[in-house]
């Protein structure tokens, strides 16, 4: 039974081309029906070219007359662009949830049909996507604030989840505890890590190390039942595979993420310059090109297909503005996996049982 | 006129070997007299081996019976180890300052003599070094808290200063303003950047982006006279050369720094594995070895010789625990440059004039 995923066709820096190509790829490779949301007059001719010889590919267009750009102020655009691709797409997710809830029997995703979807992907304005998702979908029960989670590669080859990377700033300890629960469930159900090690991002492993926020959060996380909490972890643990889920305030997570992107660029630029500087190296570089391609693939964030926004009532994945067709395809795959895994019901159940423990204590 | 620099001989992970070798190298290459502080019975025989054929090299031993290890709790060790290498070494800096202050005439460094020094370097326990420096040297007038500053490489090849990277957590806006002034003066006088661009580390360039701390700090930095403040900068700007001095809270700076270290390790590990995986690449790697060596040197933090602790009344440089002899030599050089540049009087004068503006306003 295919699952319906809706894609913001006007989100990425080069929209709608990567979105249309990515949707076609996803429809070919995965058991999904893809709904591209955007202005029909722009999308239709391009889509027609791409599906010329495969007329039965399940890629559809849902009309929306407006879209939010990277330059738009998120709060204002969400308020004024009432027929935006993001709002129309996320409404389809809300409708899909509502109809699934009302259909008592059958496969959990069978009720999605015209105008209904199980998940949403956008490579557009992150702030606007988060605000729209919060407004249209609402929050899961027990969650005060959503968190944007990103998957980072590690030296052990395993993926690792970092959250929050920018949905909130100035979080309080309760927020971080909720992030830990959400990350734990996502890692277990989508990344298929059986007993994910959850760490609190700090500046030293000892309990005494950290700032006021982490020192107040640590005992709450230690007391959390059912979570494999390993204590404070440091910035280097994000990439060494010692930790599967790393929890932090959105300001800190966003700085860590952008710092990482910056240093990867520094390292690759330096290496390229060093290789250029001698004739022997030029030959060497030529010969080792395959290795470089493999290396780039290992570090390629697009392989992971975007960051899930956890805590909203529905499935919303946010990709990088520079997403190419492969990244879009992977984003659609991740949205389908997220929806299949029933992550959100798991989050609500865990937070509910945690609250019960709180009340007993 | 040589300048006297005192070195904690028992600080690094492999002490005292790198310290002794580094001191000998520094005495050979720079116009410095190096004082190694530590247990004479351990240091004397090793030093003798290294200076066998160069008996006139200005490397001396100052006795200290105790030293603080990496495993020691900083606060406790500083209190109980009263004859530690750090305390003895930093007292020499205090004495050097006192005697320079009392000698009205002559070269500013000429008054350093037996038991007196113009700067201190340690590759030991960072927390203990900071606490000892604060206790023994005291703070500069106008500075509430010291900041640990680190120099990071950039894609443009220019160095960039990041502070605070861990001397404090939970800073307030006034602390960050003082960090900005200290970083500005250090960049100008030691890194020789004529009009350093100072940025505030945040999660977006717009003034509205950031957390409560950065939003409160931004207008204070905009109002600061004589500082080339360029507004909010992001994690990626640390390494792209767009900013010369980046100011942040010590928790955030420490996370950014350790994240960078982690990803550099990830990148180099991934690349090595990718190169190993094909025969062609093995040949390629062999041929491009020179380029790799050059590349490693570009990213090598040891080239920069350690992090200055800014804000204390004296010169204190903290190196990495894994410092080798070259890193120690560079640390001694940086301590000498810091002392020569009269950074601290510049910081006091600038903060004093800023305070005057505050009062007028």
Image: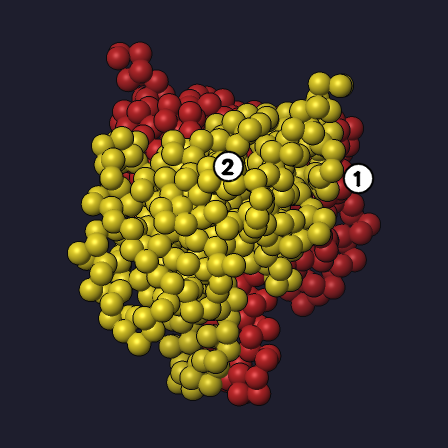
Chain colours: A red, B yellow
Q: Chain of mark 2?
A: B
Measure the alpha-carbon separation of dots 2 and 1: 78 Å
Quarter occupied by residue B71: top left
Report whether A180 appears left or right of B82.
Answer: right
Q: Are marks 2 and 1 on the same chain?
A: no
Disc number placed over residue A65 in the picture, else none:
1
Q: Position of residue A289 (x, y in %)?
A: 52, 78
Q: Position of residue A270 (x, y in %)?
A: 56, 68
- Can residue B49 be seen in this snapshot? yes
Up the image or down, A314 lies above or below B29; here it is: above
In the image shown, does B45 or B75 lie closer to the viewer?
B45
Q: Position of residue B2 (x, y in %)?
A: 48, 59
Residue at 42% in and 84% down: B286
Tag 1: Cα neighbours inside 10 Å, few (<14), some, or many (≥20)? some
Q: Position of residue B193 (x, y in %)?
A: 67, 53
Q: Nearer the viewer, mark 2 or mark 1?
A: 2
In the image shown, does A176 or B287 lie closer to the viewer?
B287
Residue at 21% in and 51% down: B39
Report whether B291 appears left or right of B9.
Answer: right
Residue at 45% in and 60% down: B32
Mark 2 — residue?
Answer: B102
Residue at 31% in and 12% down: A359
Secondary structure under the numbered disc 1 in the rendered image: loop
Report whether B300 appears left or right of A241.
Answer: right
Q: Chain of mark 1?
A: A
- Can residue B238 be seen in this snapshot? no
């Amino acid at each position: 039974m295919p699952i319906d995923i809706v894609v913001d066709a006007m989100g990425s820096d080069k929209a709608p081309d990567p979105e249309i190509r990515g949707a076609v790829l996803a429809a070919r490779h995965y058991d999904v029906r893809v709904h591209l949301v955007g202005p029909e007059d722009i999308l239709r001719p391009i889509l027609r070219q791409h599906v010329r010889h495969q007329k039965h590919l399940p890629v559809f267009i849902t009309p929306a007359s407006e879209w939010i750009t990277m330059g738009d102020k998120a709060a204002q655009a969400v308020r004024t662009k009432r027929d935006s691709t993001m709002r129309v797409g996320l409404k389809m997710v809300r409708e899909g949830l509502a109809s699934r809830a009302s259909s008592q029997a059958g496969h959990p995703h069978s009720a999605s049909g015209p105008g209904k979807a199980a998940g949403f992907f956008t490579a557009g304005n992150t702030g606007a996507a988060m605000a729209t998702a919060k407004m249209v979908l609402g929050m899961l029960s027990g969650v005060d604030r959503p968190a944007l989670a990103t998957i980072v590669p590690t030296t052990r080859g395993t993926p690792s989840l970092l959250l929050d990377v920018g949905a909130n700033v100035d979080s309080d300890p309760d927020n971080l505890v909720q992030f830990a629960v959400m990350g734990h469930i996502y890692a277990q159900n989508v990344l298929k890590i059986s007993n994910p090690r959850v760490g609190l991002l700090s500046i030293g492993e000892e309990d005494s190390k950290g700032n006021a926020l982490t020192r107040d959060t640590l005992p709450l996380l230690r007391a959390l039942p059912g979570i494999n909490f390993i204590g404070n972890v440091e910035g280097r643990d994000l990439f060494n595979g010692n930790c599967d889920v790393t929890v932090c305030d959105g300001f800190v997570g966003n700085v860590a993420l952008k710092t990482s992107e910056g240093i990867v660029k520094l390292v690759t630029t330096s290496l390229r310059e060093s290789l250029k500087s001698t004739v022997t190296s030029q030959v060497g570089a030529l010969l080792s090109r395959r290795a470089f391609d493999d290396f780039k693939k290992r570090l390629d964030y697009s392989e992971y297909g975007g960051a899930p926004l956890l805590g909203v009532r529905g499935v919303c994945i946010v990709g990088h503005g520079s997403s190419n067709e492969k990244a879009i395809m992977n984003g659609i795959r991740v949205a389908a996996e997220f929806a299949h895994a029933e992550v959100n019901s798991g989050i609500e159940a865990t937070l509910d049982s945690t609250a019960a423990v709180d009340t007993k204590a």
